Amino acid sequence: MRLLPLLSVWLLLCSLSTIAQDTPINAKTLLSAGTICDGTCAEEILGEVAIQGKNSSAAAKSLELPLAGETKLVLAGVEEGKNVLTANDAFTQSLSRFDLQVRLKRTENATLEEWKKFVAGEVLPWSDVEVAHVKPAATMLAEKLKKLKLPLPEKVLLVHTSGKEEAEAAYTRANAIFLPSVMLTYSPEKLEEKLCHELFHVLSRHDAETRQQGHRAGDVQQHRVELPAVFFVGSDHRQRHRDSNDNQLQDAGRRRQVSG
């Protein structure tokens, strides 16, 4: 005889399904946890949890979209997006005190750790509606990329953010494309164009030969700009240089489009 109301069972299922993949659960565990349920009821609940677990796995797999050859476009989860965004790399090393102040919108001193905390909070999960909106654009891009043999990384992450961390601009870090919420309102054609542009940056960062070809195509000359030490973070006030290569390469990239 079942003594647990249907609504309570459903609430229990929702709770258990979030930990089912990480925590072993059996009927004895359910009974010892104080549920008003006999052994048969507990086994039935576990069966439902198992089914939900399979459905969750299927949903996770659906977030991986074909892009080009063996390369997949992976709609990253929040934690994966945070890890890429807050990683120590050439970008974080180049951030001056002024950069941090502008991004954190303050006039007083700003630290890299404060910036990392801020940007990590702007990474968002993907809703079903947002996934459905991205798929047509990704499909159109993948169709065009079929005709090209591009040395892309095996996995290109697509990270959803609020956009507050970078003035609602799309940008890249490592093998990840960061897409602000506002761009998820774009038409599939416009979104595909944006993805194509950002993918060029992932490609040029990933493959040295492509990067050099981009430099030659845009006739990019290297220039180093000296900035006053006061702009930089750290007590040693070491002089740092900023190459104008990347900006010029981006301009060249805007003129290069993947054509059908």
Image: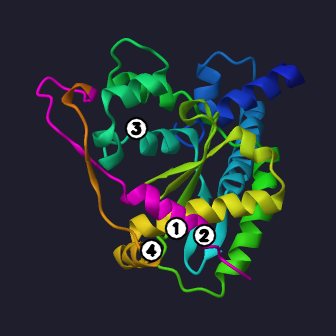
Closer to the N terminus: mark 3 or mark 4?
3
Q: Quick one: 89 or 103, which is closer to the camera?
A: 103
- Left of 208 or right of it: where is 63? right
Disc 3/disc 4 C-alpha distance (Å): 28 Å
Percent coordinates x, y for residue 132 in the rendering? 81, 54
Residue 86 numbered tag: 3
| Nearest to the observer: residue 62 or residue 23 | 62
Real-space CA distance between mark 1 and mark 4, rounded to the nearest whole angstrom: 7 Å
Tell me residue 72's x, y (percent): 59, 68
Disc 3 vs disc 2: which is toward the camera?
A: 2
The earlier-in-sequence mark between 1 and 4 is 4
Q: Disc 2 marks which residue?
A: 255
Residue at 22 percent across and 32 percent down: it is 228
| Residues at discs 1 and 4 in contact (Cβ within 8 Å) | yes
Identify the mark nearer the N-term, 3 or 2: 3
SS at mark 4 in the image: helix
Q: Which residue is mark 1?
A: 252
Q: Nearer the viewer, residue 85 or 96?
A: 96
Between disc 2 and disc 4, whose residue precedes?
4
Task: Tell me which residue sits at (76%, 46%) in the image.
Answer: 184
Q: Secondary structure at mark 3?
A: loop
Q: Residue 255 location in percent, x, y?
A: 60, 69
Mark 2 and mark 4: Cα distance apart in space = 11 Å
* CA–CA distance in space, label 1 to label 3: 28 Å
Q: Which numbered disc covers residue 214?
A: 4
Q: Residue at x 55, y 56 (%)?
A: 157
User: Over which residues does the magenta segment extend?
Assistant: 231-260
For marks 1 and 3, the one nearer the N-term is: 3
- How crowded is the residue under tag 4: few (<14 C-alpha within 10 Å), some, or many (20+)? many
Furthest-left residue in view?
236
Q: Residue at x 41, y 13 (%)?
A: 107
